[in-house]
Image (cartoon, rainbow, N blue to C red):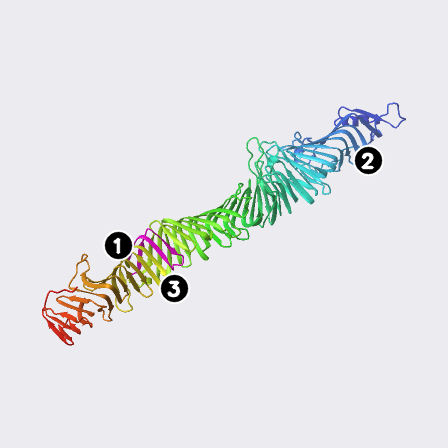
Amino acid sequence: MSGRGRLIGWAVAAGALVFGGRLLVRRPAPPTVDEPPAGFVLELEDLGRVELGIRGPVEILIPRPAEEPAGAGRSVPRLRIAGRDPRPEEGGMRLRSVVLTAFAEDGATTAWRIEAPSARVALAAGESVPRPDPARPWSLESPRLSRPDPQGEQVLSVAAAELWPDQRRIQGHGLFSLQTGGLLVRGEDLAFDLARGEARFGEGGALTWSFPLASGERAEGGSDGGGALRRLEDGGRRLELPARERCELVLPPGSGLAGTFRCRGLVADFAPDGGGAGWIPRVARGLGPAAWSGLLADRRPAAVFGRDATLVWADGRLLGLDLLGPLQAFRRTEDDSASWLAARGGAWIETRPAPEGADPPGPVLALRGGVLGQEDGRRFEADRFRLEDGHLLAEGAVALEDGRIQADRFEAFPDGRRRLDGAVVFRPTDGVGLGAPWLEMAAADPLKPDYAHFRAGGGVLTRTTLRGAPAVMRSEALEAQGFLEGDRGLRLDARRNVVIDRGGARMRGDHFAFHGESGLELRGRPAGAEMPRLAPDGSVLGRATVRADRLIWFENEVIPSGSPQIEWPAKEFGLDGETIRLRADHGRFAADGSSALLRGEVRADGALELTADTVRMRTDEDGRRLLDLVPLPQEQVRLRGALLRPEGGPLRFDLRAGGMVIDPTARTARLDRGAETNLDAGDGRLLRLTGRRAEVGPDAGVFERGASFEKVAADAPEGAAETLRGGAERLAWRRTEDGGLELDLTAGGAWLEAGRLRGEGDRIRLEARPAADGVLEPARLELEGGESRPARLRLPDGRILEGAWFRYNFRTRLHESGPVRLLPGNDHNPS
């Protein structure tokens, strides 16, 4: 074949690769007027050295190698090069307006596409015919890559790049912009994997990046340590952003976490949005130390500093930020003061859904694990902490104000109220402490910062000081208010099932009011107070109880009102039995139990029965306990009971008088203005003793001024009597060791009748002894006369003996005497 034939044959062969251009062939010759473009030198067998120049558009197809399965048996395009005005350049081919299109294995689907104003395509070395070399890098100027992606199109723009077709990668130089499914990264230098759509960003330059949010806004960030975009196994994407010093993400208001998130590196995962329109954030992990600063739900500035952190999304909506501890948080309060928080565990800054047509409210701050802090100038500790719209919640082993307040749960409300729940311990002052299931504190008054007002309920235990002594109070509810500083103290109001223990005393009621040291009030139906009563040797005699609708403790007195009832241990008065029960219209008591006053139809039962207008218990100068009794108008005081005796059984008595003074220490009773005593004779009968005044003890007594005695049936009406009776100006009686009774009538005008026996004289002594059945029977009678009047004894047969003295034995019916004179019987009765 001639040289021209070879050239034509090459040109025909090249026609399969070149479309739409003019093929210019020239031999070495002097240039013409129309200078041809620089061409490619071809070494042809027939023509020898030929230079081929092309002007205009050109397109070159690079087929898939035959050894690849998709290309077996047929020519399948792998890469198409389209451009203009190819020129040789340093072993390569320079083109303008370049479009590079890579095809998938089917040869029809576009794998990626690059547009560039200019490109240098490497040519295979040592080839007689120029052929693009995909194994070597191709240089691109300002290329723009577009690549199909499951969530839209990947678009990469870079100042300059090298394309490695065989390696399916691009090495970009200078500034770049990479956008994929709404995710945008800008920086300097990158490597891009064309097969996987992954990129690695230059470590030497700063990056900026942003991604869309469900609100339609974009989160924008920046870092200084390069990074990477990777494809995850589940089809998602991951943006890795290590940082040397700076990595931050600015979140817009619509995110619900408006502010700036800072860390030392970020790894963000993205998921398909479900509609194929782009990638939505799923989680972003920040390397510590990390921090967030912005506005909380109360629209106050705040900042949180911790270790590693995680931003969490769900369906494109940001749920919150989790920071690991130890961490610190600071915020600006309403009064423009700073509060601080610290936690060992971490923090969760939670977003909240936005109302329709508005931005989301500010986020909620929640801390966990060993929380410490200071809010409104008050320090606290807790296991968990939460702040939302000015509402503060602390939970788990909460301690406030250096341990003065403890609870399982603490809440502070925007209006200033505070509430504690679960095992509450509160010590508002040094003198008051309480425990309760819940407690509420009213908002502080700025004009009275040391004034407190709080309520507690669910079963309240209060420890305080009442009248200088420690006291413990239990109630279902408690309200307190007053000044925490100074000597004004707190006012306490306890309600429902109130029980107060002070020393050994106990008080019960439905409502207790404590007005500082000036006044104390207990109400109920009824209210009651109990106190131990001690003997001089310290032994416990029993408990005294006061019950009334209302008990007022004022100064050093307890004043009951509304049907007061008193129960007192009988032993304190030397009485047999357990308790004396007294009722009165009103009264008052010394707080220490040393004195008491009851008035208004006072009645008693139990170990002591009495009816009086006034009962006064007092202590005299010698320290003796006395009981004064004043009768009702036109009546006498009546007192019934049984006195304890050191030996033998109790001595029952029944006293009446116009007035009485009971001395429990001496175990005596002084009776005035018509005294009357009934002693047990042992046979269901009583020995009634009377006089204008008397002093009665457990085993002896004295009646004076018209004294008399008589034996009557226990149920006998007034005035009824048996034949044992007598009288004198003074009557003394005493019990003998064998249970007998001795009566001594003296002071003139003494007389006695015992059946048909009658005696008269200045002094008469009667002895009664218990019979086998325990009944007292007259045993011996002694009579003594005076100088002006001899003694007389009228015998059962009617005879009268007159002499200086007589003795008569009732059992033997024998009598003895001094010189006597026998007188005949008569009906004279000197009584």
Disc 3 marks a residue whose amino acid type is Glu
Q: Is residue 536 above or below residue 422?
A: below
Horizontally, residue 820 falls left or right of residue 154, namely: left
Cα–Cα gap, marks 3 and 2: 133 Å
Magenta region, mostly helix, strand or loop? strand
Q: Which is more foreground, mark 3 or mark 2? A: 3
- Disc 2 marks which residue? 90
Q: Residue 484 or 216: which is nearer the viewer?
A: 484
Q: Residue 201's image quarter?
A: top right
Residue 715: x %, y % from top left: 19, 58
Residue 635 — which label?
1
Q: Residue 738 or 399: which is nearer the viewer?
A: 738
Q: Give the range drawn in magenta.
A: 577-606
Disc 2 marks a residue whose amino acid type is Glu
Disc 1 marks a residue whose amino acid type is Glu
Residue 211: x %, y % from top left: 64, 35
Q: Is residue 799 above or below residue 543?
A: below
The answer to which of marks 3 and 2 sits earlier in the sequence is 2
Q: Residue 63 or 821: which is nearer the viewer?
A: 821
Cα–Cα gap, marks 2 and 1: 144 Å
Say if the magenta span includes residue 384: no
Q: Residue 622 or 360: which is nearer the viewer?
A: 622
Question: Badge 1, how many Cα within 10 Å: few under 14, some, many 20+?
Answer: some
Residue 609: x %, y % from top left: 27, 57
Residue 621 — which label?
3
Q: Is residue 317 above or below residue 504?
A: above
